[in-house]
Amino acid sequence: MSEVSASHAAERRELTAAQRNAVAELLRVSPVADELGRRFAQAGHELHLVGGSVRDALLGRLGDDLDFCTDAHPDQTIRIIKGWAESIWETGREFGTIGCQRDGLRLEITTFRAEAYDQVSRNPIVEYGTNLVDDLKRRDFTINAMAVSLPDHRFTDPYGGLADLAAKIIRTPGTPQESFRDDPLRMLRAARFAAQLRFTVHPDVGEAMARMAADLDRITAERIRDEFTKLLCGADPITGLRLLVDTGLADRFLPELTGLKLEIDEHAQHKDVYEHTLTVVSNVMSMEEDGCDFVLRMAALMHDAGKPATKAVGPDGRVSFHHHEVVSARLTKARMKALRYPKDVTSQVVKLVGLHLRFYGYGRGEWTDSAVRRYVTDAGDLLSRLHKLTRSDCTTRNRRKASQLAADYDALEERIARIAADEDLARVRPDLDGNAIMELLGVPPGPVVGRAWQHLKELRLERGPLERDEAEAELLRWAREQGVVG
């Protein structure tokens, strides 16, 4: 058999396997999907399973959220599903989408679209289309431009999506330029699908992404944030991140990532910060216990963001990045705020970035029990993630150095466990509460109580748990020094 014939045979086998996956997946949801299809047919309308649902069915990973398209308009769709659907929502009505739920499945039904963009505004102007093929042509990629008609299960693939799925290629139905001009977010979606599916971007698509990267500036921060979050939580975010940097897309919304590509010269050698960062992201992924931990991955991505601004070359030619963790934390906070991440998510990532270097003073044997308590207290409920980030940050190729760092961190964790066995390290609090402070000092609620409480907490961190009489004596001593009592 020739190489060409063998290649075609292998491709046919992959397509056959994909089609078998689709049949198995569709059989699982077909009682609901076919019943819905029959209702639309009886009303004189078409219904097709479409887009990501067909793609995921072919990949054998169809979820419980199903996407459909139809020639029926929203009002007609509501009439068809009313009384059949367990619940109906119209939040996407302005885009032609009506949602409903049935037998544990979430269904979104969208009228055929022929969207128009003025190529200035950030949102599409929705115009209803009249046929399936035109609706599929306006979709982002060929792997999302396939449909299965219901209830007859007729497969429609006018743009070669099945072949691209088998070849693991991300390609657009029309020209990439037309597609990205319509919606620049699709460039970021290409990188996201590369990360999620481990697919390769077609060369034409990659070239268009590089030429049109500046068009991403038309897109809202929230839409960019959502796509980037999915990318970073993909099965292979490294591929997606490299694509963002190589095409210049990262410069538009995450310039700190590109900035990590510091120039390395023969006189001031240091490790490649960009490659180191990607390695750290991979390392933390290997420590995840239950799916993507976005906070941990984002902290790994941003932990050295401050290095370009703090790079210095000493008289001996050695490179240093003094206090880069402080700058990294500040840059992380600003970047995540610009991308409209929730404050609680941002604060967790920023705290991890700010603490990621704290451990490196431990190996010199200078840490007291007080320092260990402060390490645990400052990390709070992020301690487990800080352990993972700190261990992942060791990417040295020097086996002896790597082994020593791992042993040092093992020793720190053992010491934390030993102290925790004697003290409640998870909740380090003063030995006297606010009520006891007010009673002992004879003061009402107010700033004095807060200051006294903070003093006792510092004492608790420094010396560990105190006996009741010892804590009271220390409080009275402090109060006399502060002039609170005579």
Image (spheres, rainbow, N blue to C red):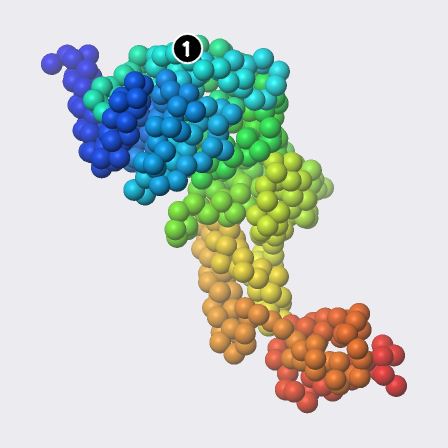
Numbered disc total: 1
**Residue 194 occupies quadrant:** top left
Front in this rendered view, residue 101 or 478:
101
Residue at position x 36%, y 33% in the image: 82
Find residue 347 and report its horizontal and vertical position in percent.
61, 50
Identity of the residue drawn at 46% across and 63% down = 410
Q: Nearer the viewer, residue 107 or 271?
A: 107
Counting other residues with Cα less than 10 Å from the Cα at mark 1, is it few (<14), some (14-19), or many (20 or more)?
Answer: some
* Quadrant for the N terminus in the image: top left
Residue 84 spot, x, y in % from top left: 32, 36
The local secondary structure at tag 1 comes to: loop
Residue 383 in percent (x, y) is at 53, 59
Is 160 drawn above or below residue 360 in the view shown? above
Question: Is residue 172 shown above or below 458?
Answer: above
Q: Which residue is mark 1?
A: 174
Residue 112 in view of the camera:
yes
Task: Tell me which amino acid carries mark 1.
Answer: Gly
Residue visible at 16% across and 18% down in the picture: 9
As drawn, 166 above or below 448: above
In this picture, residue 396 sits left or right of residue 49:
right
